[in-house]
Image (tube, helix red, strand yellow):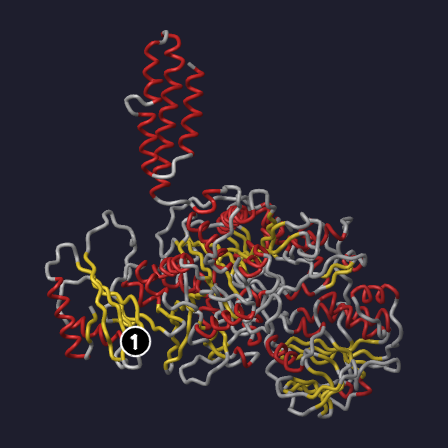
Amino acid sequence: MQAKIDALKTQFSGDLDSVKSESDLDTLYLKYFGKQGSTTQVMKSLQGLALEDKKTYGPILNDLKKDQEQAIKATKSSLEHGSTGLLGKDLTIPGIPMPMGRLHPTTTIIREMNEFFRYQGFSIGEGPEIEDVEYNFRRLNLPEGHPATDLQDTLFIEEPNLLLRTHTSSVETRILSSNKPPLRVVVPGKCYRNETTSLTNSGFFYQYQGFVVDKGINMGHLKHMITTWFKYLWGPDIKIRFRYKYYPEVSPGLGQDIQCTFCKGEGCQVCKHRGWIEMGGSGMIHYNTLKACGIDPDVYSGFAFGVGLDRMVMTKYNIPDIRKLYEGEIAYL
Amino acid sequence: MKIPLIWLKDYVETTKSIKELSADFTQLGLMLDKPLDETNVMDLEQRLNRSDLLSMLGCARDLAAFEAVKLTLPKTYTKPGLKSASDELIKVNVESKVVRRFQTRIFRGIKVGPSPKWLVERLSTYGMDSINNIVDITNFVMIEYGQPMHAQDIAKLSGDLTIRPSKPGEKITTLLGTQVELTKASHVITTGGEPIVILGVVGGKRTGVTSTTTDIVLDAGNYDSRSIRQSSRQLKIMNETVSRDDKFLDPRLIDFALDRATGLILELAGGSYYINDDYYPTPVTPQTITLRLSRLQLLSGMELDLQLAKKILKSLEYVVIEQSADKLTLEVPYFRTDIEVEDDLVSDILRIHNYANIPLIALSSPVPSDITDPIYRFEDRLRDLLVAQGAHEHITNSLTESEGRADQVILVNALTSDQNALRTDLIPGLTHVLSTYKKHKLAGVKVFELGKVFRRNEQNYLEGRLLTVMGDASSLATLMSSLGIKNYTISKTLEIKVAGKVVGSITPTSYTLVTTALLPHTVSYTGIVSDFGHTTSQDLSLLVPTNVIYADILTIIDSLKGDWLVITCKSMTKMDDKINNYLLTLTWGADSKNIDEDKSNIIATLKSKLAISSKS
């Protein structure tokens, strides 16, 4: 019986290979599955076997029949839809990539971040780029005369009140001023500063900011959120360091670093021999900021965090010059 | 701020290595500015708000608290000085609003000479040359306490001292010998009408202490930090004095610093100390602040107790005024000009307790309602649709060169003229991108940008959200169809309209859509139907005079009533100089019975109104 089955298999695959047209295929079908067809005959011959043999060969023959029907169907489909070209004939040719559209690297990183924070229940916030000094500085606990508000760093449209936002924190004060807590929001956005363009600085840059305001929010929540986020970005083994850091709009302030992935903390060019790379700042939203935005700081507390996106994009995509990133000097492969 | 290990150990006993110490300072909020080398000096970053961390003592105090070891304070001379005879007093006239305090002390009969080894060594590890014992003491105490001070040779003064705003054109030769021309942005100390010191910035050479000096007047001042900052920026002078005077120092610091300097002068240069003028119109009252245990526990997320809080705050020199089971009332030390609110005390406690000890706590409150603006998702959808068409996304600079248009937003303090205004349009940025591609021999590329443009309308500043696609204007049809917009038209003025409303514009090489205007016309789920439908399409080949364009044809057809669902223009070919051939396709629904009637009506009307004939 086994010999019969093997012969049938060989014969069928040979016949299938020589099929050139749909009518060839019809002939082939009849040859195997017609009343006198080879497969039909072998199936019939099962009846004359001993019970033991029936048990052995029955399932084998059934599978064979199904395989053959499947092969006929596939051949039929490829005949109907035409040849699959070069690949259809020689599957060992690796192929040539098709040209396709690409998102800007910064958009890709923003989406990656958004995906994480959307999952954590955050909304995405936006705000004007032409900003009032009130939202950009005052409500962030940056009083007049604070070094960070100096003319030298800010691009003004009308002095002293109208400027181009210097950080995405201005969106934070806007949202806090016009929405009631609880709030979880991230803000990706363009910011501006009065700096001459260089390898790593340009007149505008991207920040990614986030904040949470609710009852009972504490430093432990902030540390947990940043830890989860950084592990999402750099993998579960990334080492994170939390240390004190001053920012006017938060108190207590917090600085977060990741261990340099190039030297594993030994110190190298990339981390300026610190062993650690600064990854933005964060902290508990300042008492005065919540108050200035109309939120009772004795009822609600919150944390805020921010990172510069450009450096991250440049590292991830290995782009050495920020000007290339935003002046069309990037070719998409 | 440079911290030589040898100097730091004058105040804190520690056996830690410099690497371990710099790791401690990092936890405290002062990262290394430069990598460590073999010199045993740490170069720590500056902090904008804490003027006391620009002093050796301030850094030592935080470190001692962090390591829970004793802080040894320097010896100071606290005995009162002698009284000068009235004709030997040096009067100080303050004619400037930026002075909060200005104290002077007089020393007579001193011996100027070289400094002892310990002093020279400390200054040199910090990076300062030794000049003579008096100048070295003023520098040493400035670094130790963070309070700048000057010593001047009384013999070189022409009478009293006056502090007043500088006059444009006034000149002064600094201690380093550079001649500086002043503007009105600075304040000066003058004697006999001549400026001898730029207030809070740099001293002058004329009255400097030299080896022949025997009598000096020592001064320490407290000024409006903003004014010092403006003055130093204007004059482009940055030094150790400015970096401290442009921070918020407390006027009470002057007493401690001058007492220290007085002790050192008497010890190293001899002579006698006489009190002199102390201009201090509004003495500062100590700040008291209450720390609630509940607040500490709320912000930290930890079960800390008041005992620990008290221990830490005392090590930072807070004074406990009152204590109860759930709160502490404290007097803030004079040098902590950064303390504003209760949370700043929480911050101090957590910092000294080490941030590494704060536990990680997952947010457990319910997720708040979503406040994301639908435009955000819409613009992301546009990106995906264009990328699917093979277009590349770009982000270009919003800062551009002013075109001199009245409605352009102009920056008042731009550094360069090629970036002194905000863009009104995305086309120039993308044109630049395409020209870069062309330079690199990359042709036939489609690019797009989604971004903001800006306009000024009298006193209002407007921000618009645009999408511009360049390199292939024909992709508009695909985009619109993907958005479920079936009937859009292009007017004779090249505006793109949907349902009669302008949503964008088109040029031969690009098209632009206002995303906020487009969004209301779009359909979310398009491009997929559950049955293939059975519409009827018929072509209409029109011979159109060259003065007529498609928008004219469409206006006429739209004015007619008929059963057709969609009209598309498949092609336009030039026949000769007078005639173009337009090929239109009209599509009717499966149940329409008026196809022939509609068609002949269109042909007849186009013929009578626009002299268009049909070609069958």
Q: Indicate left or right for B594 with A332 as reference.
A: left
- Using the image, determine if residue B492 lies above or below residue A125: below
Name the kind of residue labelled 1 in the image.
Met
Q: Quadrant of residue B379?
A: bottom left
Label 1's element? loop
Instruction: Quadrant for the N terminus of chain B, please.
Output: bottom right
Q: Residues within 10 Å of mark 1 (few under 14, many from 20)?
A: some
Can the viewer see residue B411 in this picture? yes
Residue B11 placement (x, y as % from top left):
76, 57
Can the viewer see residue A286 in this picture? no
Residue ID at (26%, 68%): B583
Q: Indicate left or right for B507 with B203 as reference.
A: left
Residue B428 placement (x, y as % from top left):
46, 75
Question: Considering depth in this image, is A179 or B227 the residue closer to the camera?
Answer: A179
Residue B374 placement (x, y as % from top left):
34, 59
The residue carrying mark 1 is B575
Question: Considering depth in this image, is B523 or B493 the residue closer to the camera?
Answer: B493
Q: Indicate left or right for B489 with B56 as reference.
A: left
